[in-house]
Protein backbone atom coordinates (compact mmCIF):
# COMPACT_ATOMS: atom_id res chain seq x y z
CA UNK A 1 0.00 0.00 0.00
CA UNK A 2 1.63 3.24 -1.17
CA UNK A 3 0.92 5.51 1.79
CA UNK A 4 0.79 9.28 1.20
CA UNK A 5 1.55 8.52 -2.42
CA UNK A 6 1.30 12.16 -3.50
CA UNK A 7 4.58 12.78 -1.63
CA UNK A 8 6.50 10.55 -4.06
CA UNK A 9 8.74 12.12 -6.71
CA UNK A 10 6.23 10.98 -9.34
CA UNK A 11 2.81 10.54 -7.70
CA UNK A 12 0.79 7.50 -8.78
CA UNK A 13 3.13 6.34 -11.57
CA UNK A 14 6.05 5.56 -9.26
CA UNK A 15 3.96 3.13 -7.19
CA UNK A 16 1.92 1.87 -10.15
CA UNK A 17 5.11 0.88 -11.97
CA UNK A 18 5.86 -1.48 -9.06
CA UNK A 19 2.42 -3.08 -9.53
CA UNK A 20 1.41 -2.36 -5.95
CA UNK A 21 -2.04 -3.40 -4.75
CA UNK A 22 -3.13 -0.13 -3.20
CA UNK A 23 -2.39 3.59 -3.63
CA UNK A 24 -3.47 6.37 -1.27
CA UNK A 25 -4.23 10.05 -1.90
CA UNK A 26 -5.22 12.66 0.70
CA UNK A 27 -7.99 14.83 -0.74
CA UNK A 28 -9.36 18.27 0.22
CA UNK A 29 -12.40 19.98 -1.25
CA UNK A 30 -10.94 23.47 -1.58
CA UNK A 31 -12.69 26.30 -3.44
CA UNK A 32 -14.77 23.75 -5.32
CA UNK A 33 -11.71 21.75 -6.41
CA UNK A 34 -10.56 18.32 -5.19
CA UNK A 35 -6.91 18.95 -4.37
CA UNK A 36 -4.29 16.51 -3.11
CA UNK A 37 -2.02 17.24 -0.13
CA UNK A 38 -1.35 16.40 3.49
CA UNK A 39 -2.24 19.78 4.95
CA UNK A 40 -4.08 22.86 3.72
CA UNK A 41 -0.83 24.78 3.35
CA UNK A 42 0.44 22.05 0.98
CA UNK A 43 -2.37 22.54 -1.52
CA UNK A 44 -1.58 23.72 -5.05
CA UNK A 45 -4.04 24.46 -7.81
CA UNK A 46 -2.21 22.18 -10.25
CA UNK A 47 -2.25 19.16 -7.89
CA UNK A 48 -5.82 18.07 -8.46
CA UNK A 49 -7.13 14.63 -7.60
CA UNK A 50 -8.39 14.27 -11.15
CA UNK A 51 -5.08 15.12 -12.81
CA UNK A 52 -2.80 13.15 -10.48
CA UNK A 53 -4.87 9.99 -10.03
CA UNK A 54 -8.17 9.76 -11.87
CA UNK A 55 -7.00 10.65 -15.38
CA UNK A 56 -3.93 8.33 -15.29
CA UNK A 57 -6.08 5.43 -14.08
CA UNK A 58 -8.73 6.02 -16.74
CA UNK A 59 -6.07 6.22 -19.45
CA UNK A 60 -4.37 3.03 -18.30
CA UNK A 61 -7.65 1.13 -18.11
CA UNK A 62 -8.37 2.01 -21.72
CA UNK A 63 -4.87 0.96 -22.73
CA UNK A 64 -4.97 -2.30 -20.72
CA UNK A 65 -8.30 -3.55 -22.00
CA UNK A 66 -10.42 -2.64 -19.01
CA UNK A 67 -8.10 -3.68 -16.22
CA UNK A 68 -5.52 -2.06 -13.97
CA UNK A 69 -2.49 -4.02 -15.20
CA UNK A 70 -1.92 -5.42 -18.65
CA UNK A 71 -2.11 -9.23 -18.87
CA UNK A 72 -2.86 -9.51 -15.17
CA UNK A 73 -5.95 -10.21 -13.09
CA UNK A 74 -4.55 -8.19 -10.18
CA UNK A 75 -6.90 -5.43 -9.12
CA UNK A 76 -5.94 -2.01 -7.79
CA UNK A 77 -7.31 -0.26 -4.73
CA UNK A 78 -7.48 3.53 -4.69
CA UNK A 79 -7.65 4.76 -1.11
CA UNK A 80 -9.05 8.27 -0.80
CA UNK A 81 -8.41 9.94 2.54
CA UNK A 82 -10.95 12.70 3.15
CA UNK A 83 -9.17 15.65 4.76
CA UNK A 84 -11.99 18.20 4.60
CA UNK A 85 -15.64 18.06 5.68
CA UNK A 86 -16.98 14.57 5.07
CA UNK A 87 -20.25 14.94 3.16
CA UNK A 88 -19.37 17.60 0.56
CA UNK A 89 -15.92 16.12 -0.06
CA UNK A 90 -17.22 12.59 -0.44
CA UNK A 91 -20.03 13.66 -2.75
CA UNK A 92 -17.52 15.50 -4.94
CA UNK A 93 -15.32 12.38 -5.07
CA UNK A 94 -18.33 10.20 -5.92
CA UNK A 95 -19.45 12.57 -8.67
CA UNK A 96 -15.98 12.63 -10.23
CA UNK A 97 -15.38 8.87 -10.13
CA UNK A 98 -18.96 8.15 -11.16
CA UNK A 99 -18.20 9.51 -14.62
CA UNK A 100 -16.26 6.30 -15.37
CA UNK A 101 -18.28 3.37 -13.96
CA UNK A 102 -16.35 0.94 -16.17
CA UNK A 103 -13.19 1.98 -14.30
CA UNK A 104 -14.37 2.51 -10.71
CA UNK A 105 -17.49 0.35 -10.27
CA UNK A 106 -16.91 -3.41 -9.75
CA UNK A 107 -20.59 -4.08 -10.44
CA UNK A 108 -20.05 -2.77 -13.96
CA UNK A 109 -16.54 -4.18 -14.45
CA UNK A 110 -15.28 -6.94 -12.08
CA UNK A 111 -11.71 -5.78 -12.79
CA UNK A 112 -12.49 -2.18 -11.80
CA UNK A 113 -10.51 -0.19 -9.26
CA UNK A 114 -11.73 -0.72 -5.71
CA UNK A 115 -12.29 2.67 -4.08
CA UNK A 116 -11.74 2.75 -0.30
CA UNK A 117 -12.61 5.90 1.64
CA UNK A 118 -10.59 6.63 4.76
CA UNK A 119 -9.90 9.62 7.00
CA UNK A 120 -13.15 11.45 7.73
CA UNK A 121 -15.28 8.39 7.05
CA UNK A 122 -19.06 8.89 7.46
CA UNK A 123 -20.83 7.15 10.31
CA UNK A 124 -21.78 3.55 9.46
CA UNK A 125 -25.46 4.50 9.54
CA UNK A 126 -24.78 6.91 6.66
CA UNK A 127 -22.95 4.47 4.38
CA UNK A 128 -26.05 3.85 2.28
CA UNK A 129 -26.31 7.54 1.40
CA UNK A 130 -23.38 7.16 -0.98
CA UNK A 131 -22.92 5.14 -4.19
CA UNK A 132 -22.20 1.46 -3.68
CA UNK A 133 -18.94 1.58 -5.60
CA UNK A 134 -17.48 3.46 -2.62
CA UNK A 135 -16.07 1.20 0.09
CA UNK A 136 -15.05 2.43 3.53
CA UNK A 137 -12.09 1.95 5.84
CA UNK A 138 -13.31 0.17 8.96
CA UNK A 139 -12.41 0.10 12.66
CA UNK A 140 -11.23 -3.24 14.01
CA UNK A 141 -13.31 -3.03 17.19
CA UNK A 142 -16.55 -1.70 15.66
CA UNK A 143 -19.75 -3.76 15.62
CA UNK A 144 -21.12 -3.36 12.11
CA UNK A 145 -24.46 -4.64 10.92
CA UNK A 146 -24.26 -7.15 8.04
CA UNK A 147 -25.31 -4.40 5.62
CA UNK A 148 -22.67 -2.00 6.95
CA UNK A 149 -19.98 -4.69 6.88
CA UNK A 150 -20.66 -5.18 3.18
CA UNK A 151 -19.48 -1.60 2.60
CA UNK A 152 -16.24 -2.07 4.55
CA UNK A 153 -13.32 -2.40 2.13
CA UNK A 154 -10.63 -3.10 4.71
CA UNK A 155 -9.74 -2.66 8.38
CA UNK A 156 -7.06 -0.07 9.19
CA UNK A 157 -5.67 0.95 12.56
CA UNK A 158 -2.72 2.70 14.20
CA UNK A 159 0.19 0.32 14.74
CA UNK A 160 1.36 2.38 17.74
CA UNK A 161 -1.84 1.59 19.61
CA UNK A 162 -0.59 -1.98 19.90
CA UNK A 163 3.20 -1.97 19.64
CA UNK A 164 6.25 0.26 20.00
CA UNK A 165 8.41 -1.99 17.82
CA UNK A 166 11.02 -0.06 15.84
CA UNK A 167 11.34 -2.63 13.07
CA UNK A 168 14.60 -4.14 14.33
CA UNK A 169 14.90 -7.62 15.79
CA UNK A 170 11.54 -9.10 16.78
CA UNK A 171 8.28 -7.79 18.19
CA UNK A 172 7.76 -8.23 21.93
CA UNK A 173 5.52 -11.33 22.30
CA UNK A 174 2.79 -9.51 24.24
CA UNK A 175 2.64 -6.77 21.59
CA UNK A 176 2.59 -9.32 18.80
CA UNK A 177 -0.33 -11.07 20.46
CA UNK A 178 -2.30 -7.81 20.53
CA UNK A 179 -1.59 -7.24 16.84
CA UNK A 180 -2.67 -10.78 16.02
CA UNK A 181 -5.99 -10.20 17.78
CA UNK A 182 -6.68 -7.33 15.37
CA UNK A 183 -5.61 -9.42 12.37
CA UNK A 184 -7.74 -12.37 13.43
CA UNK A 185 -10.82 -10.25 14.02
CA UNK A 186 -10.50 -8.58 10.62
CA UNK A 187 -10.06 -11.91 8.88
CA UNK A 188 -12.98 -13.44 10.76
CA UNK A 189 -15.10 -10.72 9.17
CA UNK A 190 -13.64 -11.50 5.76
CA UNK A 191 -11.75 -8.20 5.54
CA UNK A 192 -8.11 -7.42 4.74
CA UNK A 193 -6.13 -5.52 7.36
CA UNK A 194 -3.61 -2.66 7.29
CA UNK A 195 -1.58 -0.98 10.03
CA UNK A 196 -0.54 2.63 9.51
CA UNK A 197 2.14 4.51 11.47
CA UNK A 198 4.23 1.33 11.40
CA UNK A 199 8.02 1.00 11.03
CA UNK A 200 9.62 0.25 7.66
CA UNK A 201 12.33 -2.09 6.43
CA UNK A 202 12.83 -5.62 5.14
CA UNK A 203 12.48 -7.14 8.62
CA UNK A 204 9.12 -5.37 8.93
CA UNK A 205 7.97 -6.48 5.48
CA UNK A 206 8.70 -10.12 6.20
CA UNK A 207 7.29 -10.02 9.73
CA UNK A 208 4.04 -8.42 8.58
CA UNK A 209 3.72 -10.89 5.71
CA UNK A 210 4.33 -13.80 8.07
CA UNK A 211 1.70 -12.48 10.48
CA UNK A 212 -0.90 -12.35 7.72
CA UNK A 213 -1.15 -8.56 7.35
CA UNK A 214 -2.75 -8.05 3.94
CA UNK A 215 -1.68 -4.49 3.05
CA UNK A 216 1.84 -3.52 4.05
CA UNK A 217 1.87 0.23 4.58
CA UNK A 218 4.93 1.82 3.00
CA UNK A 219 6.29 5.24 2.13
CA UNK A 220 8.91 3.50 -0.05
CA UNK A 221 6.91 1.49 -2.60
CA UNK A 222 9.93 0.75 -4.78
CA UNK A 223 11.90 -0.76 -1.89
CA UNK A 224 8.95 -2.74 -0.59
CA UNK A 225 7.99 -4.04 -4.04
CA UNK A 226 11.59 -5.04 -4.77
CA UNK A 227 11.63 -7.10 -1.58
CA UNK A 228 8.59 -9.10 -2.67
CA UNK A 229 9.51 -9.28 -6.37
CA UNK A 230 11.56 -12.48 -5.89
CA UNK A 231 9.92 -13.54 -2.64
CA UNK A 232 9.89 -17.21 -3.66
CA UNK A 233 13.68 -17.24 -3.77
CA UNK A 234 13.93 -15.63 -0.35
CA UNK A 235 11.73 -18.37 1.11
CA UNK A 236 12.98 -21.50 -0.63
CA UNK A 237 12.04 -24.76 1.06
CA UNK A 238 13.58 -28.03 -0.10
CA UNK A 239 10.99 -30.27 -1.73
CA UNK A 240 8.37 -27.60 -2.38
CA UNK A 241 6.93 -27.53 -5.89
CA UNK A 242 8.13 -24.03 -6.60
CA UNK A 243 10.57 -22.74 -9.17
CA UNK A 244 12.81 -19.77 -8.50
CA UNK A 245 12.01 -16.54 -10.32
CA UNK A 246 13.36 -16.16 -13.82
CA UNK A 247 16.48 -14.05 -13.98
CA UNK A 248 17.39 -14.59 -10.34
CA UNK A 249 18.64 -18.17 -10.30
CA UNK A 250 22.11 -18.69 -11.73
CA UNK A 251 23.20 -20.24 -15.00
CA UNK A 252 21.91 -23.58 -16.25
CA UNK A 253 25.45 -24.58 -17.14
CA UNK A 254 26.16 -27.02 -14.35
CA UNK A 255 29.54 -28.52 -13.56
CA UNK A 256 29.95 -32.29 -13.53
CA UNK A 257 29.85 -32.42 -9.74
CA UNK A 258 26.51 -30.64 -9.50
CA UNK A 259 24.69 -32.22 -12.44
CA UNK A 260 22.72 -35.31 -11.36
CA UNK A 261 23.90 -34.93 -7.77
CA UNK A 262 21.51 -36.86 -5.52
CA UNK A 263 18.56 -34.65 -4.60
CA UNK A 264 19.41 -31.98 -7.17
CA UNK A 265 16.85 -31.10 -9.86
CA UNK A 266 18.83 -30.13 -12.95
CA UNK A 267 15.85 -28.46 -14.64
CA UNK A 268 14.91 -26.26 -11.68
CA UNK A 269 18.38 -25.75 -10.19
CA UNK A 270 16.95 -26.70 -6.80
CA UNK A 271 17.28 -29.42 -4.22
CA UNK A 272 14.29 -31.75 -4.08
CA UNK A 273 15.46 -33.34 -0.83
CA UNK A 274 17.89 -32.54 1.93
CA UNK A 275 21.47 -33.76 1.71
CA UNK A 276 22.96 -35.60 4.69
CA UNK A 277 26.00 -33.84 6.07
CA UNK A 278 29.25 -35.59 6.91
CA UNK A 279 29.89 -35.61 10.63
CA UNK A 280 33.54 -36.40 11.37
CA UNK A 281 34.37 -38.21 14.59
CA UNK A 282 37.63 -36.25 14.97
CA UNK A 283 39.25 -39.39 16.35
CA UNK A 284 43.04 -39.39 16.31
CA UNK A 285 45.34 -42.42 16.39
CA UNK A 286 48.09 -40.38 17.98
CA UNK A 287 50.52 -41.09 15.16
CA UNK A 288 52.94 -38.49 13.80
CA UNK A 289 53.27 -39.67 10.21
CA UNK A 290 53.18 -37.41 7.18
CA UNK A 291 49.84 -36.24 5.83
CA UNK A 292 48.93 -38.39 2.84
CA UNK A 293 45.91 -36.63 1.37
CA UNK A 294 44.58 -33.09 1.41
CA UNK A 295 41.13 -32.32 0.02
CA UNK A 296 41.10 -28.73 -1.22
CA UNK A 297 37.67 -27.58 -2.43
CA UNK A 298 37.29 -24.11 -3.92
CA UNK A 299 33.70 -22.88 -3.87
CA UNK A 300 32.26 -20.17 -6.07
CA UNK A 301 29.67 -17.70 -4.77
CA UNK A 302 30.28 -18.67 -1.16
CA UNK A 303 29.97 -15.50 0.84
CA UNK A 304 28.65 -15.64 4.40
CA UNK A 305 25.09 -14.92 3.26
CA UNK A 306 25.14 -17.80 0.75
CA UNK A 307 26.60 -20.22 3.29
CA UNK A 308 24.02 -19.21 5.90
CA UNK A 309 21.12 -19.54 3.46
CA UNK A 310 22.28 -23.00 2.38
CA UNK A 311 22.72 -24.11 5.99
CA UNK A 312 19.18 -23.08 6.90
CA UNK A 313 17.66 -24.59 3.74
CA UNK A 314 19.43 -27.94 4.18
CA UNK A 315 19.26 -27.95 8.01
CA UNK A 316 23.03 -28.09 8.18
CA UNK A 317 26.18 -28.21 6.06
CA UNK A 318 29.26 -30.41 6.23
CA UNK A 319 31.22 -27.17 6.28
CA UNK A 320 29.60 -26.26 9.59
CA UNK A 321 30.93 -29.47 11.17
CA UNK A 322 34.57 -28.46 10.73
CA UNK A 323 36.49 -27.83 13.93
CA UNK A 324 38.33 -24.88 12.48
CA UNK A 325 36.83 -22.27 10.15
CA UNK A 326 38.58 -19.08 9.10
CA UNK A 327 37.86 -16.11 6.87
CA UNK A 328 39.89 -15.18 3.82
CA UNK A 329 39.93 -11.78 2.13
CA UNK A 330 41.31 -11.23 -1.31
CA UNK A 331 41.47 -8.23 -3.63
CA UNK A 332 42.16 -8.79 -7.30
CA UNK A 333 45.15 -7.14 -8.91
CA UNK A 334 44.10 -3.70 -10.09
CA UNK A 335 40.58 -3.88 -8.66
CA UNK A 336 38.89 -3.62 -5.29
CA UNK A 337 36.26 -6.26 -6.06
CA UNK A 338 37.24 -9.79 -7.00
CA UNK A 339 35.50 -12.07 -9.48
CA UNK A 340 35.44 -15.85 -9.15
CA UNK A 341 38.33 -16.30 -11.60
CA UNK A 342 40.73 -14.15 -9.58
CA UNK A 343 39.42 -15.34 -6.22
CA UNK A 344 39.57 -19.05 -7.06
CA UNK A 345 42.96 -18.72 -8.73
CA UNK A 346 44.40 -16.97 -5.69
CA UNK A 347 43.35 -19.93 -3.56
CA UNK A 348 44.57 -22.49 -6.10
CA UNK A 349 47.99 -20.92 -6.62
CA UNK A 350 48.70 -18.76 -3.61
CA UNK A 351 49.22 -15.75 -5.89
CA UNK A 352 46.99 -12.72 -6.49
CA UNK A 353 45.36 -12.60 -9.91
CA UNK A 354 43.64 -10.04 -12.07
CA UNK A 355 39.93 -10.45 -12.66
CA UNK A 356 38.97 -12.75 -15.57
CA UNK A 357 42.32 -14.55 -15.33
CA UNK A 358 42.24 -18.23 -14.32
CA UNK A 359 45.67 -19.33 -13.01
CA UNK A 360 47.28 -17.03 -15.54
CA UNK A 361 49.17 -13.74 -15.36
CA UNK A 362 48.08 -10.71 -17.34
CA UNK A 363 51.01 -11.48 -19.68
CA UNK A 364 49.55 -14.91 -20.45
CA UNK A 365 51.95 -16.98 -18.36
CA UNK A 366 50.53 -19.98 -16.47
CA UNK A 367 50.81 -19.86 -12.69
CA UNK A 368 51.50 -23.26 -11.07
CA UNK A 369 48.79 -24.55 -8.75
CA UNK A 370 49.51 -25.69 -5.23
CA UNK A 371 49.06 -29.31 -6.33
CA UNK A 372 52.07 -28.94 -8.66
CA UNK A 373 54.47 -28.37 -5.80
Image (tube, rainbow, N blue to C red):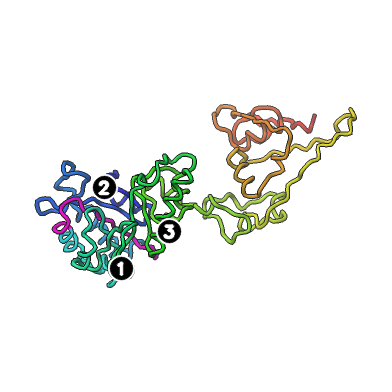
Mark number, residue 6: 2
Q: Quadrant of residue 335?
A: top right
Q: Measuring 66% from the left and 51% from the top, which residue is drawn there? A: 254
The secondary structure type at the circle numbered 1 is helix
Q: CA distance from mark 3 to mark 2?
A: 31 Å
How crowded is the residue under tag 2: few (<14 C-alpha within 10 Å), some, or many (20+)? many
Looking at this view, is 37 or 335 the one in front?
37
Q: Is residue 166 visible?
A: yes
- Residue lying farthest bottom? 108
Q: Which residue is mark 3?
A: 184
Q: Measuring 18% from the left and 67% from the top, which residue is drawn there? A: 129
Looking at this view, is 136 or 339 the one in front?
136
Q: Quadrant of the C terminus?
A: top right
Give residue 253's position: percent from left, percent from top.
Answer: 63, 51
Q: Is 80 part of what is drawn in magenta?
A: yes
Give residue 304's position: percent from left, percent from top.
Answer: 60, 38
Q: Quadrant of residue 149?
A: bottom left
Give residue 222's position: percent from left, percent from top.
Answer: 38, 47
Q: Which residue is mark 1?
A: 150
Looking at this view, is 121 or 224 the one in front?
121
Give the number of callouts: 3
Judge depth for marks 3 and 1 and give the one in front.
Answer: 3
Judge depth for marks 1 and 2 and give the one in front.
Answer: 1
Mark number, residue 297: none
The secondary structure type at the circle numbered 3 is helix
Looking at this view, is 358 or 260 the one in front?
260
Magenta range: 73-89
Q: N-terminal of the two: label 1 or label 2?
A: 2
How crowded is the residue under tag 1: few (<14 C-alpha within 10 Å), some, or many (20+)? some
Amino acid sequence: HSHNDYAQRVPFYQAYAQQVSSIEADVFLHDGQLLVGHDVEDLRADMTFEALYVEPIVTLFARNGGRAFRDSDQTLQLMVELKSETDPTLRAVAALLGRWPEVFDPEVNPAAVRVAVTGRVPAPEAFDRYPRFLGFDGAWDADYTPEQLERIALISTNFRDFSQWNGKGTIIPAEKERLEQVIDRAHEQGKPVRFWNAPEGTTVYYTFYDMGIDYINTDNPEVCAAFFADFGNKNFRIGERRTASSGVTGTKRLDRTTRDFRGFQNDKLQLSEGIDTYRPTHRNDGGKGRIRNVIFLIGDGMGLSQITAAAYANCGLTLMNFNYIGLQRNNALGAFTTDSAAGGSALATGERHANRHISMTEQGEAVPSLSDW
